[in-house]
Amino acid sequence: MLLAAPITAQPAAFDPSLPGLVRHYGDLRADLARAARRDEQARLNGQAAELYARITAMLHPGERTVATDALAALNLRAYPGGPGDLTAYVVVDVHGVSIGVRRRTRDLYVHLDTTETPDSVLAVEVNGGGETDIPIW
């Protein structure tokens, strides 16, 4: 039985014109990644709009109510997750605070933006374990 010699791949020789081509025509990989992020953002925006429409239809079809006004004021938005994220990054506005949440592989990430409020202390309670005061810088 004859055994063929193993095939070994040789790296391509460096092409000095390649950086110039990337500079001239653009990096195709970066273009594809940008397009994928744009498509993902459009999908998430569509889902948020559909959710808003379905909730407002359940509340009181065709009429503005306190509930639909409150729902619109939430300014619900979603952004594609990044490396290590299990979910999209979802943000809502409540009482002048932007609250962002994403589930990651190692934890649950919650971001609070209080720059539009005069508060100096954030009282947080997790799973009924009692409040913890956190100073806001």
Image: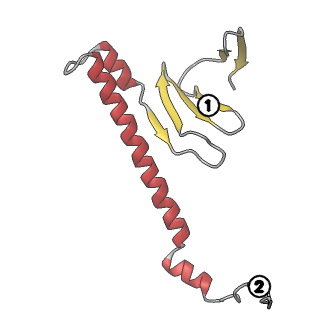
Q: Secondary structure at mark 2?
A: loop
All told, the count of numbered labels is 2
Between 7 and 19, the one nearer to me in the picture: 7
Q: Is residue 82 above or below residue 22?
A: above
The residue sitting at 65% across, 89% down in the picture is 15
Residue 101 at x, y percent in the picture: 58, 31
Quarter of the figure that contains the C terminus: top right
Residue 39 at x, y percent in the picture: 42, 53
Q: Residue furthest front?
A: 1
Question: In the picture provided, is 12 more to the left or to the right than 50?
Answer: right
Quadrant hosting residue 50 = top left
Between 80 and 93, the one nearer to me in the picture: 80
Q: Is residue 42 above or below residue 56?
A: below
The residue sitting at 49% across, 65% down in the picture is 32
Quarter of the figure that contains the N terminus: bottom right
Q: Which mark is residue 111?
A: 1
Read off the residue under disc 2.
Answer: 8
Sort mark 2 into few (<14), some (14-19) or many (20+) by Cα contacts within 10 Å: few
Residue 97 at x, y percent in the picture: 53, 24
Closer to the camera: disc 1 or disc 2? 2
Q: Is residue 77 above or below residue 18?
A: above
Q: Which of disc 2 and disc 1 is earlier in sequence?
A: 2
Q: Amino acid at mark 1?
A: His
Between 101 and 5, the one nearer to me in the picture: 5
